[in-house]
Amino acid sequence: MKRYYQPEIETASREKILEIQNEKIVRQVRHVWDNVPYYRHLMEEKGVAPEDIRSVEDIHKLPFLSKADLREAYPYGLLGTDLKNCVRIQSTSGTTGRRVVAFYTQADIDLWEDCCARAIVAAGGTNEDVVQVCYGYGLFTGGPGLNGGSHKVGCLTLPMSSGNTERQIQFMMDLGSTILCCTPSYAAYIGESLAERGFKPEDNKLKAGIFGAEPWTEEMRREIEKSLGIRAYDIYGLTETSGPGVAFECEEQQGMHINEDHFYVEVIDPETGEVLPEGSRGELVFTSLDKEAFPLLRYRTRDICVLSRKPCSCGRTHIRMSKPMGRSDDMLIIRGVNVFPSQIETVLLNEGYTPNYQIMLDRERHNDTFDIYVEVSPDQFSDLMSQIQRMEKSLEAALRTMLGIGPKVHLVAPKTITRSEGKAVRVVDRRKLHD
Ligand code: ADP
Ligand code: ZN
């Protein structure tokens, strides 16, 4: 039997979803116009008034909001209600610059936690599960979001936060955790640490993992599923729209259903801002349809992906987004060629290497240098220089084929690349120092 957290919404007909969206958008635009002078000015500049937005069909008339706007309006400029109505602040991880703070009323927290609860149920969660949350707690949205969702489903929740891997493993084994929530890079590290302690995948009680907050590849998914003996599900979100749970994977594992009753989604050409038809690759733009305290309209995420309305065998009707392949600002331009770290991860795992790697960029006499440090597994580890060199050359060739540009590969001993407990740091770019 298929299970949903909110079946009437998650499996609603297309007409019903549109009806909900149309009703909410009219109300939300009015709310923002009345309460957020910053956005009202943007609307005035574009010559749009609330009366012009009668349905989601009209959303394209509204101005975009960008991360630069959020920074400019920091901290209170986009607040949609009195501070006395707010009960929580969360903040971005600051991966790409100054942190953004987001505000929540109790209703905002409720809808966010509902979204996370949908994700947990989609991953097979029930009130019989033990959910180990090792996303960071605190300002970062990962811990609080999944924690709240887990409570809503009635799971026994372990609010571990990130780090202290020894304790994570002890609690996982002693208390029989069945669902693990953390970043995929930390999940891979936990898998590795379990193996090192002599545990086999079948020794733990885990059945599923809900992993997100950073880009990860299908190859990484298979690696984690194997090492932990689970099914690994993707979850997507960002602080600006609430946190994790904007979209989540179902048992199909073919893209993430976006919670369309709360978020209206568009994909645009990042250069021109033109709205692209379904199936095109472009930048995700979200409009929150019912958030009160931080009601962002047409927020440009810089995350690049593809949307699909293909029906899903799970019975959910909400549109699906592909795994974001990285943000537009994760994209590296190396000697004029566009490179995404996720492409490198795909090659490494396909060639039998570990997901522990770091990309190092620098500039030497006005030319970019491009080095990748890749850890070998203990059984690949070899003292024979000739063997290592041969392996490096062959990996360089595979990477050149994928990227169209050749890095210098350095294979390094097991355990020499720092593990991440939150979002992994894949790129060290020293080129800016020389500009
Ligand atoms: P920061 O922008 O500082 O990292 P957040 O913690 O709010 O702040 O992170 C949100 C971002 O994390 C998203 O915009 C996206 O780039 C990335 N992200 C979140 N979930 C996923 C996922 N499942 N796959 C790929 N990237 C993700
Ligand atoms: Zn589905």
Image (cartoon, rainbow, N blue to C red):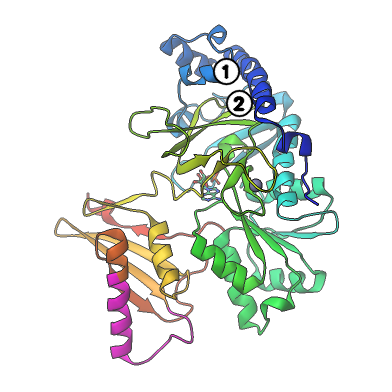
Crowdedness near tag 2: few (<14), some (14–19) or many (≥20) residues, C-alpha within 10 Å: many
| Label of residue 295 in the image | 2
Q: Residue at x 77, y 45 (%)?
A: 4
Indicate which label's residue lies in the foreground, 2 or 1. Answer: 2
Residue 32 lies, in percent from the top left, at 59, 17
Residue highlighted by disc 1: 36
Q: Is residue 61 visible?
A: yes
Q: Residue at x 48, y 87 (%)?
A: 379
Q: Name the secondary structure under disc 1.
A: loop
Give amino acid for label 1. Answer: Val
The residue most toward the left is 365
* Number of marks: 2
Q: Is residue 292 above or below residue 208?
A: above
Q: Quadrant of residue 46?
A: top left
Q: Residue at x 44, y 9 (%)?
A: 47
Q: Is residue 380 above or below residue 156?
A: below
Give amino acid for label 2. Answer: Pro
Compare residues 294 and 396 and report the one nearer the observer. Answer: 396
